[in-house]
Image (cartoon, grey):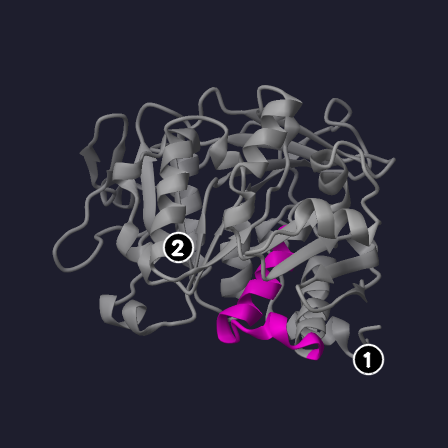
Amino acid sequence: MDRSSKKGSKMACCFPVILDRSMRSSFKLSKSSSSNKLNKSKSSICSPTSLSMKKKSVQENDHLVVCFGELLIDFVPTVSGVSLAEAPGFKKAPGGAPANVAVGIARLGGSSAFIGKVGADEFGYMLADILKQNNVDNSGMRFDTHARTALAFVTLKADGEREFMFFRNPSADMLLTEAELDKNLIQKARIFHYGSISLIAEPCRSAHLAAMETAKNAGCILSYDPNLRLPLWPSAEAAREGILSIWDQADIIKVSEDEITFLTNGEDAYDDNVVMTKLFHSNLKLLLVTEGGDGCRYYTKNFHGRVNGVKVTAVDTTGAGDAFVGGLLNSMASDPDIYMDEKKLRDALLFANGCGAITVTEKGAIPALPTKEAVLKILDGATAN
């Protein structure tokens, strides 16, 4: 998304999104049991939202990170520090945690792809095009004619708490089926990243589990950010059980302090013993705990510690954790064993902290994700303690 074109503009919560006829007609949909998906031609994917990438170049890319899950529209208030009800208007921004991570990696110069489903509607087409514009391989996207693209209203209130309101009953991302998965794309990945929102309802839950199995069998590193959103789950207990149901399969897990408290039924999120005994598992290579502006903690089988954050003035914290994950996975895609060298890991985590810090200085997630040059600039003179 072009940030410069949005500056100074006032946007209400309802507005037209215009796609010209040539753009709309180039999307080719084929019928499936529960949805429609893009038809691939024999030579290429004939769509303006398809990344123009030769198959050979993708196969040769051993640094690919494939992100699986939801892609949606975030609406954030045009002014800071208010509740959703108090907001005078909203600015639309592309979002969805796995998609944020994919764009974050690509914006840093890495290689990423996204697998998920949106509606065959104006927002869905726009989101697919935004991925393309940000150099994310979107060939794994599917479009559903029976459900709309998900919407989320999110704000950072004056007390620092985030407030969410979701519109997805059901939204297209919930209807992705196993038959619609691009398993060949998953098998080309070095890292397969996912959250927990895609575990909430069928058929997407089964598609999620099948994608994980495909990635694991292909030798991918499995990266998991639960990204707890309680209002989307039937109950708190269902959320806890659902998130933990795939816990022991991940190689890398990122959680927040609040998520530790939730998952451990109220235990101290700052207690290293709690983290190691309740959340660290035998197959895990790296467990990360993000602490907002204070930085992060890291745990491996051989060592643990913390890396200080980068101090900035927060405008909107949406996507900060995704930027952090994108920064780390971009480093790990080039050096998968980075978790074994504490100094290298600390350097990578400082860089990831810088990614998160920059993201909170602007409204929206994807529009605020930084370039490598921007991160290095903000980290200039900073050292990991």
In primary-sequence order, the first of circles 1 and 2 is 2
Label 1 Cα crowd, 10 Å radius (few <14 / some 14-19 / many 20+)? few
- Marks 1/2: CA distance? 40 Å
Seen at 55% across and 59% down, the residue is 104
Q: Is residue 157 left or right of residue 99?
A: right
Circle count: 2
- Disc 1 marks which residue? 381
Q: What's the magenta region?
A: 322-343
Which mark, residue 216?
2
Residue 163 is situated, as x and y percent measured from the top left of the image, at 73, 30
Q: How would you rate the neighbour count of disc 2 (Cα within 10 Å): few for under 14, some for 14-19, many for 20 or more?
A: some
In this orientation, does residue 315 appear?
Answer: no
Residue 157 x %, y %? 81, 34
Q: Are marks 1 and 2 in contact (CB under 8 Å)?
A: no
Q: Residue 108 carries which label?
A: none
Q: Nearer the viewer, residue 264 or 140?
A: 264
Relative image position of residue 111 (x, y in whole percent): 44, 66
